[in-house]
Image (spheres, coloured by chain):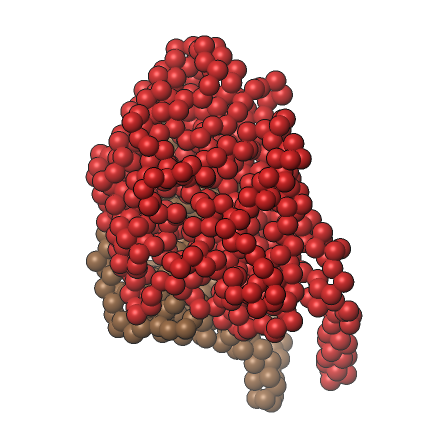
Amino acid sequence: MLRGKLLCAVGALVFGSVLAQPAAADKLKIDFWYGNSGDISKRVQEVCQHFNDSQANYEVVCTSQGSYYNAVQNTIAAFRGGKPPTIVQVFDVGTLDLMLSKAYYPAYKLMEDNGYKIDWSNYFTGIRAYYASSKGDMFSFPFNSSTALLYWNKDAFQKIGKTEAPKTWEEAADDMKALKAAGYDCPLAFDISQDESWQLMEQFSAVHGEPIATENNGFGGLDATLTFNKTKFVKFVTDLKSWYDQGLAKIKSPNTGEDYVAAFAAGHCQMTLTSVGDHGNIGRTAAPDMHWDVAMLPVYDGTKRHNSFVGGASLWVLQNHTPDEYKAAAAFLNFIAQPEQALFWSTVTGYIPVTKTGYEYMKANGFYDKPPYKGREVAIASLSVEATSSGPGGIRLGNFLQIRGEVSNGLQEIFAGKATVQQGLDEAVERGDAILRRFEQTYKGEQLP
Amino acid sequence: MAVSQPTTALDDPRRLPGVVGRVGRALRRGRATRADSATRATEKRAFFTSRSLGWALITPQLLLIFTFFYWPAGEALYWAFTLERPWGGGNEWVGFGNFAAMVGDPVYWNSIWRSLVFALSSTGLGMAIALLLALLTDRQLRGYRIYRSVLVWPYAIAAPALGMAFRFILAPEAGFMAFVNNIWPGLWNPALDGLDAMIAIVTAFAWKNIGYNFIFFLAALQAIPRSLIEAAAMDGAGVVRRMRDIQLPLLTPTLFFLLVINLTDSFTDSFGIVDIMTQGGPARATDLMVYKIYFDGFKGLDYSGAAAQSIVLMLMVMVLTFAQFRFVERRIHYK
């Protein structure tokens, strides 16, 4: 009796697993794992669909892993298990982790080997620099790309007699005071709870041409040390704290009830600093009769403006795959680099085109001329500001998410009044340096590619 | 029968098998004696005659424990003594270097301290309120079966969903606490005040466990013979007196069981709530050990540091549980 039941169960299992095998497919399937979720995830699926519809030979199976962290984590697990996806999306600050992983097939080589001629100089300088090796070779394909902008409420600024966004922080401070005097409760919204080091510290340092770390922000070697406690960033935090104390700037986070993007969109706050990727979101959620626009991040008076850094993620092709699978991957990467796809992608998300031809194509199509997309060209301008000095094109530091965590903790101590600005930043730098040394020791004997 | 419930809860696969295995065995031993004596007269017992069938039945469980506990734990132990590259391809032996770095790091001590505060206060709060509710419910008990099923629901809510709800309820500028802040401006701000943030996660975690604890307390109270309470009442003992002198002493086995489970839970299962509600902040005020492990390992890709920390956490939970059995259980009488 029992044995009979057991046999039945085993039989059912075997039979089930046979059924579960995919039907013999004509197309070669490759896996693409990405981290976006929600609306952006749907858009990625649409891009995949476009590719699959255009293809007779290959099919890309796109799977969201829920978040950037999970995409990296799950890929590491799969890679260690010997079954990595062919293509994986890795966020900006994970670039160095990937570069040292020896787990990838460099993008430039992949395209070369599969007979595609890619004009890498077609990519915007700011974007190329972030993802290229020290020799200028591209190791991954920039995918969803953004940068930080100042969002400002035109209606509120009209009340204080202004038609333009502040260009300097001095001007911004005056505007905040004027807005407050005009009865606005929250002239500037910001947050320090998680990854806001991105716009507050990293992008601020970029546009001011200030170093975040020695060795050219880490591009020169793994022995870089952090320096943001000795730059204009200290002045910025000091000012931000004083604006906060005066009630001119307010912390808006999920923990206070409304995050800074939502607070700006609802018209509760009149300025904020966030990614151009939020442009579409704010456009959809903004109060109906609210007029708003974006501008480049302000710089301090007398500072020469430098290009901001690209944020977002790039696509890496991983090892342990067959030549055919690599052909499929190359076809997919080539497909998404086409101007038509750039137009689609930038329309449905808020991300910017990554190539000059994509940008020109979109301009020629009148994309930037009218709302709701008008204004997104500022991001391109911000990324393309001609830098006079040979400033770093990005950040190349290991375990950078942990360093962001230290920056957040430092800022939280400062704004909670538990540490002075200098103390808080010194501590963040000291702890961040320990993280860098640990990373250096983990990759002992390795050279930056 | 009430005694079957603790066993089911202990078989919960999310708990650390090593620790709870021991707790569970000890508990079952204790409970079994009580159950035996209570039911010896009525219950006919069955035995398996062949040893091999026993082994066959236990093998799947052993395999599961090996695959999901001993193997990864062994791997973690190895990583804790090396610097492991996340993508593989090399690791460097550092001996006790990872542990030395932890011990020398005030932030790590902070996280131990915060974990203890969190564990003790959330366990205390969750058990006290559940006990109070159970004592009150036990007095007038029409429809207690409904309470039993309804009140355990919070325990089934996924921690992130729970965190989301409490984040909203306790947000200083929205929800209920906005109202409180309107009356006393600046009173409550978990976004910047570490104490407020700790109160927030303790509240959320205790709320989750209250229903679970309540069920056990209620079942145990139901198991106390009515005659004892009635006798006390006839001797002139009031409600409070009866609770203190009759019910609470007879509840100690349940109290002890829940103490062990709640403490272990608050060390190992608090991560979801912290991740949604505070992300360990502000300024590390809610940086619990288990959250720090997640952050360093999964976000920071510092596998070795996270492995070393999880070894320490595991040892700590084991020592705590052992201490409870060694020192607290002695004062408990199961009969």
Q: Is residue B50 visible?
A: yes
Q: Quarter holding the N terminus of chain B?
A: bottom right
**Looking at the image, residue A214 lies above or below residue A84:** above
Q: Which is nearer the eye, B179 or A358?
A: A358
Q: Is B16 left or right of A238, judged from the image as shown?
A: right
Q: Residue at x 56, y 81 (%)?
A: B59
**Looking at the image, residue A108 lies above or below residue A372:** below
What count of labels does the image hold? 0
Residue B89 placement (x, y as % from top left): 41, 73
Residue B182 placement (x, y as % from top left): 43, 20
Q: Is residue B206 visible?
A: no
User: Which image quadrant is residue B94 in?
Assistant: bottom left
Q: Residue at x 61, y 18 (%)?
A: A289
Q: Colour of chain B?
A: brown
Q: Which is nearer the eye, A302 or A314?
A: A302
Q: Is A372 left or right of A221, judged from the image as shown?
A: right
Q: Residue at x 38, y 28 (%)?
A: A298
Q: Which is nearer the eye, B63 or A29?
A: A29
Q: Quarter holding the C terminus of chain B?
A: bottom left
Q: Colour of chain A?
A: red
User: Which image quadrant is residue B42 in?
Assistant: bottom right
Residue A312 placement (x, y as % from top left): 50, 46
Q: Is B164 left or right of A13, judged from the image as shown?
A: left
Q: Residue at x 48, y 60 (%)?
A: A139
Q: Is B298 left or right of A155, judged from the image as shown?
A: left
